[in-house]
Image: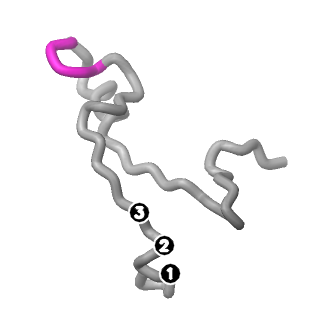
């Protein structure tokens, strides 16, 4: 927003432990380095309605 992107173009969602990227949930031993993977911020890139986030660019 500081760079001129309208607030309405942002979506914020909190998932807690509902979308883990590994097996490190409650009552599962994991080293701290693995827990860090679940503490993340994700950005999706949308261009003309198409989600480019996981596309392979050449």
**Residue 9: which disc?**
2
Q: Secondary structure at mark 1?
A: loop
Q: CA distance from mark 3 to mark 2?
A: 7 Å
Q: As drawn, is 21 to the left or to the right of 44?
A: left
Instruction: State whether residue 58 is above or below residue 3.
Output: above
Query: For mark 3, does the 10 Å Cα neighbourhood hold few (<14), some (14 to 19), or many (20 or more) residues?
Result: few
**Sequence-wise first label, 1 or 3:** 1
Could you tell me if the residues under marks 1 and 2 are in contact, i.e. CB atoms within 8 Å? yes
**Residue 11: which disc?**
3
Q: CA distance from mark 1 to mark 3?
A: 12 Å
Could you tell me if the residues under marks 3 and 2 are in contact, i.e. CB atoms within 8 Å? no
Q: Is residue 56 magenta?
A: no
Residue 20, horizontal then vertical, whole percent:
35, 29
**Residue 42: which disc?**
none
Quarter that holds the N terminus: bottom left
Instruction: Name the residue carrying label 1.
Output: 5
Instruction: Report the magenta residues as a range.
Output: 24-28
């Amino acid at each position: 927003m500081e760079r001129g992107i309208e607030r309405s173009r942002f979506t914020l969602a909190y998932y807690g432990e509902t979308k883990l990227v590994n097996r490190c949930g409650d009552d599962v031993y994991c080293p701290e380095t693995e827990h860090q993977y679940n503490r993340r911020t994700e950005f999706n890139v949308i261009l003309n309605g198409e989600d480019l986030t996981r596309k392979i660019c050449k």
